[in-house]
Amino acid sequence: MALHILFTWLALSLPLLLLLLLLSVKNFNNKKKNLPPGPPSLPIIGNFHQLGPLPHQSLWKLSRRYGPVMLIRLGGTPTIVISSPDAAREVLKTHDLDSCSRPQMVGTGRLSYDSLDVAFVEYGDYWRELRTLCVLELFSMKRVQSFRYIREEEVGSMIESIAKSAESGTPVNMSEKFMALTANFTCRVAFGKPFQGTELEDEGFMDMVHEGMAMLGSFSASDYFPRLGWIVDRFTGLHSRLEKSFRNLDDLYQKVIEEHRNANKSNEGKEDIVDVLLKMEKDQTELAGVRLKEDNIKAILMNIFLGGVDTGAVVMDWTMAELARNPRVMRKAREEIRSCVGNKKWVVEEDLSGLKYLKLVLKEVMRLHPPGVLLIPRETIGHFKLSGYDVDPKCCVYVNAWGMGRDPGLWERPEEFVPERFEDSPIDYKGNHFELIPFGAGRRRCPGMSMVMAMIELALANVLHSFDWELPEGMTEGDVNMEEGAGLAVFKKVPLTLLPIKASHKIDA
């Protein structure tokens, strides 16, 4: 009888003993490792309670205490936050290959057709071949130049609409103008038709884009609590909201693809991105041994829309907000443009290379307001040392581009808007200088950067050339609201409204 009780006790105790043994081994291994410092975490939720509504700001404050390489836990996911150029260089250059994958998340996975896109897919042969395709076929300089006429036409349309407000003395919501501009340009580049004045506007295209961006940047409990998180996502309504967003976007992509299949296009010089992708499908192009199909095309379109529309609008919006708050800088930029362009009605792309100060302004804007405040997270695929600390595979890595732009150890008077700080500096935003990486760096740098910047420079140059700008009556520079809104791309929380005045210098008709 006693022996039976002993065996029963052992049978019941064995799982508990094994669990304690595993925990002891894990704790022993962690003690042997030199892990990055970080704030204490709570059971189950980890450090979620410390993120707040604007995680990039909260993480920057924590990094000031715990250092530029900081370990936090989001649920059960070990997460490393990088807040210095040296550490960013180690991750994005020295150990680029060890940290170049992406964490697989519910929102990005669903909207990218199970990660068939270039931005959110895991590292591997498929991603390498797809990125090569994007760089050589979709976003090459030749392709960027082929869309020049679209940039010029859409910027011209925006300037003409602003001119009507100038004639009537009506303030303009510049946030809306820039969003419409980038939406029209992106739709014409991808679909061959603008957003405004077409069925895309009637079908709520912009609502789809905003909702898609919200889903990409949303918190899904399933990402951090895989076993039970799906229950939370259904209870909060996130699951049904994500499915609705996916269906709406999928219907849009399908309709556009069918229109292109049925069209009889003969002008090769004006083919849009859907034309290019359908031609590849027809030619039976393969990516990592998998033939390019409709879902691949839709996933690429998702990247173009949900990345292209917001990124350009965000940068232009913050630029005009900073210029409105800093009239000295606005005058200097405007004088340079008008001196270079003279009495011509439009700034054209050949003029842009001579606008040195405008380029300094854009660098300063992206220092303070990078379009991706926390670069798209990476996932490690190998063990490596980072600033002397141990990093294991399957860690999530965030680079706080916003925080690095405001580091007093890197920048003199970091909160002030001073474009001249870049005057004698080699620093650019193309991923070569890790103090300023608004578009990322290394293998996962944004492949559409040239396309976005071409539009931003042309639009801002024409906005400053064609009009003088004033704040609405009763406002001063200090009244311009610079609060940030939450999201994947950080917009101004309060839209920017300015009063356009017909240019004080003579412009030829």
Image: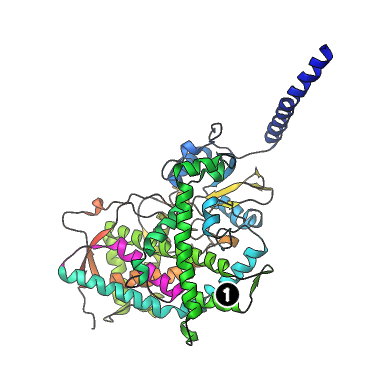
Towards the viewer: 362 or 296: 296
Q: Is residue 200 above or below residue 69?
A: below
Characterize the local packing of mark 1: few (<14), some (14-19) or many (20 or more) Cα atoms within 10 angstroms. Answer: some
Q: Quadrant of the N terminus?
A: top right
**Whole-percent x and y of residue 115?**
58, 59
The scheme the figure's colours follow is rainbow
Q: What stretch is highlighted in magenta?
A: 169-198
Towards the viewer: 444 or 353: 444
**Whole-percent x and y of residue 419?**
37, 61
Residue 23 on the magenta span:
no
Question: Which residue is pictured at 54% across the width and 36% down the height?
Answer: 46
Q: Is residue 58 above or below residue 116?
A: above
Towards the viewer: 111 or 473: 111
Question: Which quadrant would residue 193 be assigned to in this image?
Answer: bottom left
Question: Which residue is pictured at 49% across the width and 50% down the height?
Answer: 400
**Whole-percent x and y of residue 357?**
37, 68
Principal secondary structure, stretch drawn in magenta: helix
Q: In this view, does 159 lie above or below 88?
A: below
* Residue sticking out furthest to the front: 1
Viewed as shown, does residue 202 lie left or right of 190? left
**Residue 29 visible, this angle:** yes
Q: Quadrant of the C terminus?
A: bottom left
**Residue 69 visible, this angle:** no
Viewed as shown, does residue 327 lie left or right of 381? left
For badge 1, the amino acid type reads: Leu
Q: What element carries label 1?
A: helix
Q: Name the residue under label 1.
A: 136
**Whole-percent x and y of residue 137?**
56, 75
